[in-house]
Amino acid sequence: MPSRKGDRRERELVNLLDEHGFAVMRAPASGAATDRDLPDVLAGDGQRFYAIEAKASSGRPIYLDADEIESLSYFADSFGAEAIVAARFDHEAWYFFDPTELYRTDGGNYRVKKETALREGMDILAICGQSEQSRLF
């Protein structure tokens, strides 16, 4: 998310995770500023450790290319964290996904639709281990 709106959404996600007891670090250089495979956000609470790729949209589907998911998974595995895609649509909460469970397009990329996020995405309580959904992580 290289835009100002994207930066704002990443900071919003960092604050949300912080409010739920995570130590959080945003890596604003992810993507263009380095050749390293870096997630947008790293978060941990002593029990759970996440490498997060954050995406926001006004309502259109969110697309992630295969390289983004591969880089996220590589970093997460190397770091000892779980890879997560965080999706936020305007006027909605953050929803979280295991990248291996995202819809794969015919071109090999990944997609999250708003309807899918609302129906299938995990909420912040699941990420924190405070809901029935948390058994997925």
Image: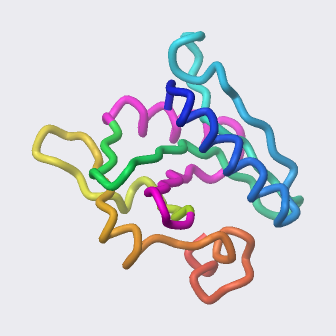
Along the viewing direction, whichever of 114 and 23 lies nearer the viewer: 114
Q: Residue at x 51, y 25 (%)?
A: 2
x, y percent for residue 86: 53, 53
Q: Is residue 116 shown left or right of residue 96?
A: left
Extreme residue in the bottom direction? 132
Q: Is residue 86 shown left or right of residue 114?
A: right
Q: Is residue 6 shown left or right of residue 43?
A: left
Q: Split into 4 quadrants, where in the image is the C terminus?
A: bottom right
Q: What stretch is highlighted in magenta?
A: 65-93
Q: Residue at x 88, y 63 (%)?
A: 21
Along the viewing direction, whichever of 59 and 45 lies nearer the viewer: 59
Q: Which residue is drawn at 63% across and 78% down?
A: 134
x, y percent for residue 66: 32, 35
Residue 115 lies in quadrant: bottom left
In the rendered image, residue 74 lying in the magenta stretch gets the answer yes
Q: Which residue is drawn at 46% across and 57% down?
A: 90
x, y percent for residue 16: 74, 58
In the rendered image, residue 97 lying in the magenta stretch gets the answer no
- 58 is higher (above) or lower (below) than 37: below
Along the viewing direction, whichever of 112 and 92 lies nearer the viewer: 92
- 67 is higher (above) or lower (below) than 45: above
Q: Is residue 8 shown left or right of residue 97?
A: right
- 120 is higher (above) or lower (below) than 79: below
